Image: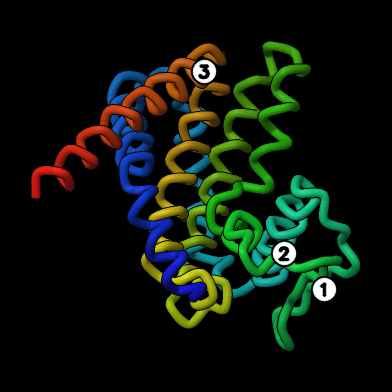
Amino acid sequence: MVKLIRFLASFLLIPLILAFVHEGYLFLQANARFDAISELVYGFIAYVLLYLLALHDRIRFLEHFEHELGHALMGLLFFKRIDELLVNPQEGSNVKMHGTTDFNFLITLAPYFLPVFTLPLLILRLFVFTSLLGVVNFLIGVTLAFHYLGLAREFKREQPDIRDSGPVFSLLITVTMNVVFLVIILSAVLDDYQGIIDYLGRAFSRTIAYGQALINLLRNR
C-alpha cells in the first residue's frame, strides 16, 4: 500500500518537479555569472581539491553529523520532539524522534537536499560588514561543496532512507529540492532576494501549466 501511494505521489509530482527544475535551469542560465559569484566558486573548488587530496575519509564524523542534523532540523520544522541524536560513523548514526515519521518523506530525505552548514551563513551574511562578504561567500562555497560531496557519497539504493522512500521517488525529490536550495543560495549571494520570490512564482505557474497539459494528455488517450 505504501509503495502504491509513493508511486501515485511520484506521478502526481511530475508537473511540479519538471517546473521547478526547468525554472531552476533558466535561473542558473541567467544569473550564474562567474564575476558575480567568484568567491563562492573559489570556495567550492578549494574544498573539492582539499577533499580529494587529503580529507576524504577524515571527515566521516562531520558528514554523519550533517546527515543526522538534517533529519533533526526537518523534524523540528514538523514539530517533532528530538529524543536522541547519535553520531557514530563506526557503529551507525541515528536520530530518534517522538512520534512516527513513516509518511514524512521530507524528514526522511532531508539530509540529501538540506545544506545544513550553508544555511547559517546565508543568515550571517545579512549582518556582516560589506568588506567581509567575500569571506562569507567563500565559506558558502566550501559548505555547499561539502554538502554535494556528501550527497554523492551517501545517495545509494541500499541506504535505509533511500530504500524506505523508494529510489525513484527519492531521486526525484532530492534533485528538485537541491535545485530549489541552489536558487535560494545563489540569490542570497547575489543579494537578489526578490529573485527567490520570482523563481517560486514562475515555478508554481509553470506547474499549473504542466499539470493541465498532463491532464489533457491523459484525457486524449
CB under 8 Å between discs 3 and 2: no
CB atoms of marks 1 and 2 within 8 Å? yes
Q: Is residue 55 left or right of residue 219?
A: right
Number of other residues with Cα within 10 Å of mark 3, as a class: few under 14, some 14 to 19, many 20 or more? few
Lateral position of residue 123 relative to residue 168, left or right: right
Query: Of 81 and 27, which appears nearest the observer?
Result: 81
Q: Could you say whether the residue bearing mark 2 is in a helix, strand or loop?
A: helix
Mark 2 residue type = Glu
Q: Label 3, secondary structure: give it.
A: helix
Q: Nearer the viewer, residue 203 or 100?
A: 100
**Residue occupied by mark 3:** 197
**Tag 1 residue:** 86
Q: Is residue 89 visible?
A: yes
State the colouring used for the structure image.
rainbow
User: In this rendering, is residue 88 above or below 29?
Assistant: below
Question: Mark 1 Cα within 10 Å, few/some/many (few <14, many 20+)?
Answer: some
Q: Residue at x 16, y 44 (%)?
A: 219
- Say the numbered circle drawn on residue 68: 2
Give amino acid for label 1. Answer: Leu
Name the residue at the bottom extreme.
91
For label 2, count other residues whose C-alpha is less than 10 Å away and answer few (under 14), some (14-19) or many (20+).
many
Residue at horizontal 45%, vertical 63%? 170
Label 1 and label 2: CA atoms lie apart by 8 Å
Which label's residue is closer to the chain start, 1 or 2?
A: 2
* SS state under label 1: strand
Please, is residue 118 above or below residue 82 in the view? above
Measure how far apart labels 3 and 2 are at the Cα level: 29 Å
Q: 59 above or below 201?
A: below
Please provide percent x and percent y for residue 58.
Answer: 64, 72
Q: Position of residue 209 (x, y in %)?
A: 27, 28
